[in-house]
Amino acid sequence: MKPVYLDNNATTQVAPPVVEEMLPYFSQFYGNPSSMHTFGGNVGKKVREARAKLAELVGAQPEEIVYTSCGTESDSTAIWATLRSYPEKRHIITSKVEHPAVKNLGEYLGRNGYRVTFVPVDKAGRLDLDYLYKHLSDDTAIVSLMWANNETGVIFPVEEIAAQVHKRGAVFHTDAVQAVGKVPIHMADNQIDLLSLSGHKLHAPKGIGALYVRKGTKYAPFLLGGHQEHGRRGGTENVAAIVGLGKAAELAASQLEEENTRVKALRDRLESELIRRIPNAIVNGDPAHRLPNTSSIAFEFVEGESILLMLDEFNICASSGSACTSGSLEPSHVLRAMDVPFTAAHGSIRFSLSVYNTAAEIDLVIEKLPPIIDRLRKMSPFWGQKEKACQIIS
Ligand code: PLP
């Protein structure tokens, strides 16, 4: 039975036309794109075509795209490449709600000789811009802020921030892993220096990502090796995945409008119906500045993991806002940074849709989830005395 898959911020189905485009590059066209012979040269040509399609999706020049293995590699490369290009600068700015790909690197750098500023967010997940600008200094090498948050979908005004960061002479990087294919991106019209993306979030396979590097940006390669990617990332190209990402980029460009109309309407209906039918259900994150496909809802006084297990019985896939750390379920760092009360953070569920979702699937969730929450609340020690619980916790 096909799952009702509402976990597209975790990963997406590889689009059937993407699979079709990739297959010959495993079997028939296996040449090395760097080879001198025509057999390899034809593969090189396909890699160049794919690069042009990806560049077009984000309004960039093909030479500004560097293929990587994933979003995490793109993020790490962007930050390390900048720090090594400006060894005299020892300060980094990022936010409290970044994906671990940036957050954990920031913490590591903080323990290893760098000064790292983690900009806070408000209760709606919006960045404190005054705090950010106040902390910019001549010593700031790089500011790294996500375009859209993977848990709440909240969008940061990265284009506006990039312009301010440039005025202080720092490099600006954005982790756009969740934004690409969901919001319009046109690099020719902004001042962002480095942008990370990941194939498996936009219906390409896992194991392929890219880093946009604006022409003229100082860059010290992370992987030294062959001359691939114009010497910016050594290693024989993952040809089939690159071809797949090119096709996925072409599809994403053609489906951007559908993401922002039909998919958004499905998300909005799911959200408003759940809020209407379930008491004590609250949307996490600024509804006015959000990805069109993401909804994070806190169902107070229940455990997110129990909700997920019960949804799983109906083959409905979503994510919770908790992470299993040292045996206990901790609310995620994103919800904690937003000061979401403990009782709500624990019961937070993220639904993330894609163009493959249908109205019938959304109807199923709207039908199945309210009785699940009702059942769980009847078992919850806090639900019966929620006023008291709120006082203890707040
Ligand atoms: N950045 C964000 C915002 C993400 O959501 C993810 C993946 O969930 C990543 C980075 C890491 O991407 P990858 O899984 O391709 O390494």
Image (tube, rainbow, N blue to C red):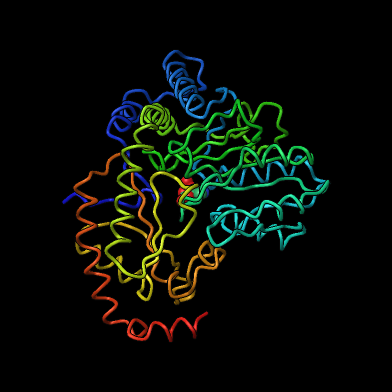
Q: Residue furthest top?
A: 38
Q: Nearer the viewer, residue 325 or 159?
A: 159
Vertical order, 333 against 127 (above or below): below
213 displayed left or right of 21? right
Image: 126 above or below 261 = below
Foreground of the two, 25 or 378:
378
Please give the name of the residue rendered at 20% of the width and 52% of the height, measured from the top-left corner.
Answer: 363
- Taking 116 as reference, is 157 above or below it? above
Task: Using the image as rendered, state which of residue 158 and residue 312 is in the foreground.
Answer: 158
Query: Residue at the location (74% across, 37% down)?
Result: 166
Q: Classify residue 82 as left or right of residue 138.
A: left
Q: Position of residue 255 (x, y in %)?
A: 36, 31
Q: Is residue 227 above or below residue 301?
A: above
Q: How many marks?
A: 0
Q: Residue at x 24, y 66 (%)?
A: 370
What residue do we see at 30% from left, 65% from top? 308
x, y percentage for residue 317?
A: 29, 56
Quick check: 258 left or right of 166?
left
Residue 298 percent coordinates (x, y): 40, 65
Residue 148: image location, x then y, percent: 51, 47
Residue nearest the observer in this picture, 188 or 272: 272
Q: Quadrant of residue 96?
A: bottom right
